[in-house]
Amino acid sequence: MDYRLPKQDINTEPFMRQSPRYNRKDVFMRTDKAYKCEITNIVELTPTEKLFHLKILSDQERRIFEFRPGQFVMLEVPGFGEVPISLSSSSNNSEYVELCVRKSGRTTNMLHRAKTGAKLGIRGPFGTSFPMEKMAGHNILLVAGGLGLAPLRAPINWVSEYRDEYKDVHILYGTKDPDQMLFTYQYEEWQKVDHIKLLTIVEKANKDWNGRTGMITDLFKDIDIKPDDTFAIVCGPPVMFKFVCDHLDGLGIPMNRMFVSLERRMHCGMGKCCRCMVGSTFTCVDGPVFDYWSVLNLKEAI
């Protein structure tokens, strides 16, 4: 007797119609779901960074995809591999997701050659997030260095959309030189429309730079920080965390109210490959968002 198994479409299963929750501290789904996407827009931010707008092709999947500020996705360039990329868009935007990608390897180099209409894949979202609801009713200090403004843009969008729930909001942003600054077209919007105070600084000025020059910690003397009523989010190169967070600690902000985003050699996003391990901690599933007190107890984390 010729017996054939009936065809099955896993996407019709009930659990596939729910938003995936990949954080190990919650519940893993029974499948590693990937979303097929199309590049709908590309914004060239600097010679090495581009902002990609990705639209999930399936209407149903676009509706169920959701994330929180601080999480990331695994971005696949078919035939060339995948890389972990922080989500830069608003978590309330269901039309497309925004990923800021630096050209730094084989996969990202190929991505930078892609044009609108190219098809990509994303898995996720993965990891922990910034406790935005916990910060409501307090002052918010957002500190970024270099490419760190990309993951910080999600909490900036959150604060902008729920601006009446927060007190004073400051963004401190520093880069090596003016040409490396990201999202410059949004600075006026953040300050005038969303009433967020933005301070920028560069380590080395050029002939067209009229702003501050120095280290990012130099900006702290230009703002009034209330340590008992302030939460801080810090994103940037790991070497920056120690200088910035130690400075905030000296100002009296508790370490459990400072949050950093670590992206340490992440590869699979699900704690399977062990490349991102720091001691017994997986950066991809136990992080990437940690409070600074936890980071100090992770050997070699920074």
Image (cartoon, grey):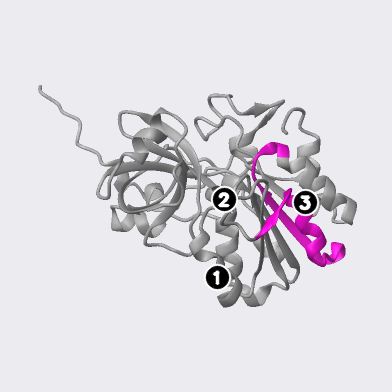
- Foreground of the two, 25 or 48: 48
Given this view, does label 1 or label 2 mark the residue nearer the observer? 1
Report the disc number at residue 123: none
Q: Quadrant of the N terminus?
A: top left
Name which residue lies at 58% across and 76% down: 192
Q: Residue tagged by mark 2?
A: 151
Determine the residue located farthest toward the top in the rendered image.
Answer: 1
The residue shown at (38%, 36%) is: 76
Image quadrant occupied by the C terminus: top right
Residue 229 screen position, x and y as percent: 82, 66
Check disc 3: other Cα within 10 Å, few if <14, some if 14-19, many if 20+.
Answer: some
Where in the figure is residue 296, as x and y percent of width and height? 80, 37
Going by the numbered disc 3, the residue's amino acid type is Thr
The local secondary structure at tag 1 comes to helix
Give the amino acid type for the residue marked by disc 2 in the picture: Pro
| Numbered circles on residues, count | 3
Q: Which residue is mark 1?
A: 188
* Residues rendered magenta in the picture: 211-239
Distance from the alpha carbon under mark 1 to that under mark 2 = 19 Å
Q: Is 214 part of what is drawn in magenta?
A: yes
Identify the amino acid type marked 1. Answer: Glu
In percent of width and height, residue 175 lies at 62, 48
In the image, 55: left or right of 200? left
The x, y position of residue 263, in whole percent, is 60, 37
Residue 250 magenta-highlighted:
no
The residue that label 3 is drawn on is: 217
Q: Which quadrant of the figure has residue 36?
A: top left
Q: Is residue 177 left or right of residue 29?
A: right
